[in-house]
Image (cartoon, rainbow, N blue to C red):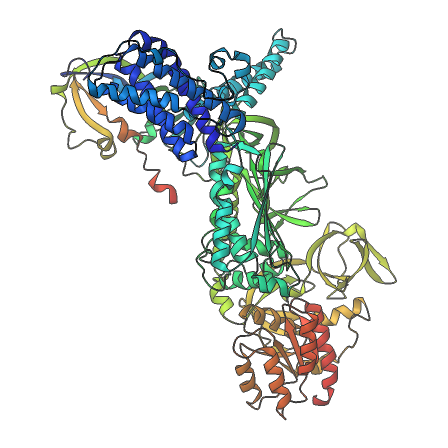
Amino acid sequence: MNDSPDFTEYVTFTMAGQIFGLPIERVQEVFRPARITRVPLAGAQIAGVLNLRGRIVTAIDMRSRLDLQARDEGQAPMAIGIELGTESFGLLVDALGEVLKLLDGEREPNPVNLDRKLARVSAGVYRLDGQLLVVLDVNRVLDLGLETAAAA
Amino acid sequence: MDDLLREFLTETNESLERVDAELVRFEREPNNSQILGNIFRLVHTIKGTCGFLGLPRLEALAHAAETLMGKFRDGMSVTAEAVTLILSTIDRIKLILDEIENREAEPEGGDADLIDSLARASQQSDGGTKPVARPEAETPELHEAPEPAESQPPERPDDERGDRIANHSIRVNVTTLDYLMTTVSELVLTRNQLLEIVRRHEDSDFKVPLQRLSNVTAELQEGVMKTRMQPIGNAWQKLPRIVRDLCAELGKDIELKMHGAETELDRQVLELVKDPLTHLVRNCADHGIESPAERVAAGKPAKGTIRLAACHQGGHIIIEIADDGRGLDVARIRAKAIEQGLAGEAEITAKSDIEICNFIFAPGFSTAAQVTNISGRGVGMDVVRNNIEQIGGTVDLQSVAGAGTKFTIKIPLTLAIVSALIVEAGGERFAVPQLSVLELVRAGRAGEHRIERIKDTRVLRLRNKLLPLIHLRDVLRLGETDAEDGFVVVTQVGSQIFGIVVDGVFHTEEIVIKPMSSKLRHIAAFSGTTILGDGSVIMIVDPNGIAQMLGRAAQTARDGRPELDNREEASADDTVSLLVFRAGSHQPKAVPLSLVTRLEEIDCRKIEVSDGRHLVQYRDQLMPLLRIDTQSDLKRDGAQPILVFSDHGRSMGLVVDEIVDIVEDQLKIEVESERPGVLGYAVIKGNATEILDVGHFLPQAFSDWFRRRDASTDRLTRTVLLVDDSPFFRDMLAPLIKAAGYQVVAVGSAADALSALNSGKRFDLVITDIEMPDMDGFALGEKLRSMPSTAELPVIAISAMVSTAAIERGRAVGFDDFVAKFDRAGLIAAIKEQGADIEWAA
């Protein structure tokens, strides 16, 4: 989107065998999360908070966010750092893939049979050889609906 | 010096300094419009401000210079002489400014010379001439300025100027300060981390330099914090005017005294306390201070005083707002609290006056009889408290009837860095801000302090008070709390004191508060996050949130029991708080809670036997212990629950097996009992329950407990008419009188009382409130005395306010006795006394 309007670069990652992509300009950095402090009463989607070079990062458990099975014990996640406003978030994913440069024209709308929960945060899909890459909309991924649920 | 003037000087000197640098260039490039523009702006600003500040000399000079420069801006070419003229003008302005700074007034003299030259130069432009080097312009005439000679200003030594205000204060953007604060916070964090690392390595080379770094960091932190400090007086500036306006509006005479206005605090905190302070002062003026007439009648000076004082205390600032007005009306607050369902009877009878006063902080609470412009709309005090608590502060309240009310606000100096207690619960660490921590108590099965349970609630007995406890592990759902061991962090939020039970306590640490993630803000238990010395992130526990949860937990515990239906419904009827317990038999027994002074558990080993009587040392007295069922034995070890009844400084303990519950129910004795000590049976929450006759036990403890003991058998046949417009007092007093062995008919007005008396039903005694709408107690008393059928009927007056004048008047009316409303024992004694007199009626 930056230099060439026809291409977008995606940071890809996998979770439960599925490939996902995030537009690279929304990704601040990727890191291996260490010492995540869980936050009581926060709900399963919040994996906790951690200290990343003096910044407090709220870690989102993407498996839980997308209603996928919980990660196996001992399987260390990777984190994708995202900034939203003045806040930092870390999306916890299974493993990082390569950065893909994909033609915007090849992006297809969500298939009708895409999982409802996934469809809500997806900005479209790419057909890679034999695999489907789901492009995630960062803002929607981070809209946990907690602000409105505050009263509950 | 006037703030406005100081500001003007600072600002003008800054601009002058900037222009000074450009003046040299101006000489070389007289037609540079940018430089011209800068000088023009300066002169223009001076002109504008001077008129406002009343500096005519400076104003006139600036005006003349502005006119000339306006011409230049309009295209007139700049001549050398004009440049000199402008430079001279700038010099003259500096001269005058210096003088103003020293003497706070313009120097004597005029600037006609310069103004004339300036005007001439301006006019020349109209003639279109292009003069070069005019004689008078060459030698700027400064002679007219009397004191400082023309040559002096430029020669003024710099060190002299160093003392000037202008050079002492600079204007810094708030964002810069905030950024500095954040950076220092980071530094503090890093320092903490380093200290943590060194702590682990005993003999590290870093130890000494790190100690220095640590000290320097602390100094820097303090210094940066200081830059953000502002005197609290800034938040007070508007108050004298507000009070003055209120006085005019309310017809009061109030003096506002302010002390410690120079006390400094963080500007962020200052902003946040501004509104609460204003509100409290308004309240003092409106509610607190009486009208001059009232004050004079009460023997006070007609002029009321509101005292506002601030001082530093540790890391906090203490602000007091005190008035010498009428004080809070405890009785009215109590009645209002009941009426608005803020507390039940049982709860409120257990509360001290101060605790009752604190109801004014409850949402929607207002006792103002009429809603005034200023206050009484029931919005405010809760907001005041919320605002203050939000910044980690507390509000305390003291009130003395007739002498005044005092609010004490305690707030932290800064919000960015606070001292916190690092605790552990369920394997996780949390920070508890020190500000709300009163003390730390180690509780354990073996130790001095034990965690006890009353029903489902855990409590800690601390210096004769029962402290409600909340386990952090429970609130945060961090797993089962099995042990009764732990540390109790005694916490105060407003007037509410409770204990937060944690598994462990580490140390205190200066923590930097990081705002909570927006995704976590809905969790009331936390107020923020912080990074500890070891680099890990922990959550900061919000005592306010925990306090709310404590309330909610109690609520759900109540809601969970269906037999305890809601309170409003119950209190609408003639309900009483009853303490249900078991003693001896399995059948539940009950006694009106209002009669019980305290629930205690005593160590069985402390029970002594003397002369066949059981005694225990209790509050430095020997307290007799009585058993309801004399057959049963006292427990030999462990804790023995007892009900303590106190009267006139004497106490007796009634031994019970178990306290079952406190219920709100009607006290209707269905079946009277032949057994001594039992008034009868009533159905309480579906169970047949023995209603205890406390009167039976008291004389057993002290044979002279009642001065006159009536034969308990015929007491219930006597009927008392209770007249009180307040449902609360009817509810409170009726069971009390009932428990003393009388039938009670309670009515809400004097009119109802008269119709009840005329209904043919026989009454043996009338107890009437004095303060009632329509017909008051005095009028009722007079009426009763005037009617033949009631002329001899004993009448006891009760009043929230018992003054000598009222007693005199009562005597004149023909009251047989006059008792304060809250003097339960006095009322019972009066009834007994009058009861003996009405023996003829039995």
- Measuring from the top left, give residue B297's x and y in whole percent: 63, 66
Left or right of B317 in this view: B817:
right
- Measuring from the top left, give residue B719's x and y in whole percent: 63, 82
| Residue at the left extreme of this rendering | A105
**Whether residue B675 is visible:** no
**Whether residue A97 is visible:** yes
| Residue at the bottom extreme of this rendering | B788
- Measuring from the top left, give residue B233's x and y in whole percent: 53, 38
Quadrant of the image occupied by residue B410:
top right
Vertical side of B175 occupied by B782: above or below = below
Residue at 85% x, 63% y is B612
Left or right of B594 in this view: A78:
left
Residue at 38% x, 25% y is B61
The quarter of the rendered structure image containing the C terminus of chain B is bottom right
| Residue at the right extreme of this rendering | B611
Quadrant of the image occupied by residue A38:
top left
Vertical side of B336 occupied by B669: above or below = below
How many marks the image carries: the answer is 0
Q: Nearer the viewer, residue B613 or B171?
A: B171
- Measuring from the top left, give residue B503's x and y in whole percent: 59, 34
Q: Nearer the viewer, residue B97 or B191?
A: B97
Q: Nearer the viewer, residue B144 or B837?
A: B144
